[in-house]
Every structure is written in structure tokens, then in C-alpha cells.
Amino acid sequence: MKKKYTISRREMILGTTAAISYGLSASAMKSLEAVPEEQILPGKLDNSVLESPFFNEVRFKVNGKTKTLPVDNRTTLLDALRENLAMTGTKKGCDHGQCGACTVLVNGSRINSCLSLALQHEGDEVTTIEGLGKPSRLHPMQAAFVEHDGYQCGYC
């Protein structure tokens, strides 16, 4: 006697979705194997990582000095400044562009650096809070931070 197999529409959709998901996840894992984990960590990048489709080189001027960085394509300007260049005056507050703690000047215009990718600023001039004045002669913004104890982010 021959056994008749029946499959419902729901089972067909679930099976197809599972098969496609498995295939996509396997190919995604293979593409991640192309970049060793030690090259993904900040400060551990070398020139060979630029051959990866996940990294590019960005060059911009920060506080008057030209900087060239290999960055992950998803790196925000805020993270590039803080993690790659140790410019910790620019703070990560809400990470949604609402608080203004990450504000920097790009080509003289104020932007939220947490909402902007580093690669978008190729050739731009970026000024952080550290670039506004000098310890001996503070910029009015820096003086206000000191006067009002705005050391964390200055937002409050």
C-alpha cells in the first residue's frame, strides 16, 4: 500500500522559509570568515583588511590634522573619533541623535556624529570640542563645560 503524503500550505511556507534561511545564514557565515576577528577589533587593523568588502579607508582632517583610517563600513563618525582617534571629548549620549552629546562641526556645520557614517566624511574638516581652544585659552564652549560641570556630555 502506497503512503500518501500531504502537506499544508502553512507547512510548505515554514519549510521553504527554513531552507532559505539556512542557506542565507551559511553564506553569511562564510563571508564573515574572510575577516579574522583580530582585524575587526579597534586598533588592530592592518592594510590587508582593506581588501575586505567590509572595510574602507577614510581620510579627513580632524582639528586641523589630516587623519587616514581603515574603518568598518558601518562605523559612525562618533565611534571613529572616540575609538580610533581617542578623541573622547565627543560623547556618546543617547546614540539616537536626540541629546546632542555627540555634536561636532563638519566643514563649519553642526552635526550629530552618532547619526553619520565615518565614510560619508571623506575629505571633510571635522572639529571636535578638543579642537575649539587650548588649555591655556579655553573656547567659550569649553569654559561653559568647566563652569557648569558638564564633564560627562554637557547636555544637562
Image (cartoon, rainbow, N blue to C red):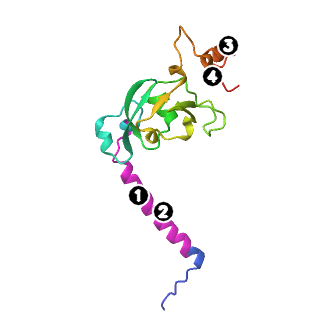
Real-space CA distance between mark 3 and mark 4, rounded to the nearest whole angstrom: 13 Å
Mark nearer the N terminus (2 vs 1): 2
| CA–CA distance in space, label 2 to label 1 | 8 Å
Which amino acid type is shown beneath numbered disc 3?
Glu
In the rendered view, does 17 fall on the left or right side of 51?
Answer: right
Is 42 or 153 nearer to us in this picture?
Answer: 153
Which disc number belongs to residue 26?
Answer: 1
Q: In this view, does 29 lie above or below 44?
A: below
Q: Give the range drawn in magenta.
A: 12-38
Identify whether 96 is placed above or below 67.
below
> Residue 115 appears in which quarter of the rendering?
top right
| Image location (x, y in percent) of residue 79 | 50, 33
User: Can you identify the residue that label 4 sits on?
Assistant: 152
Pick the front one: 115 or 94: 115
Distance, label 1 to label 4, CA atoms, is: 43 Å
Residue where numbered disc 3 is placed:
147
User: Disc 3 vs disc 4: Cβ atoms closer than 8 Å?
Assistant: no
What is the distance, in whole Å, between disc 1 and disc 3 at their CAs?
Answer: 55 Å
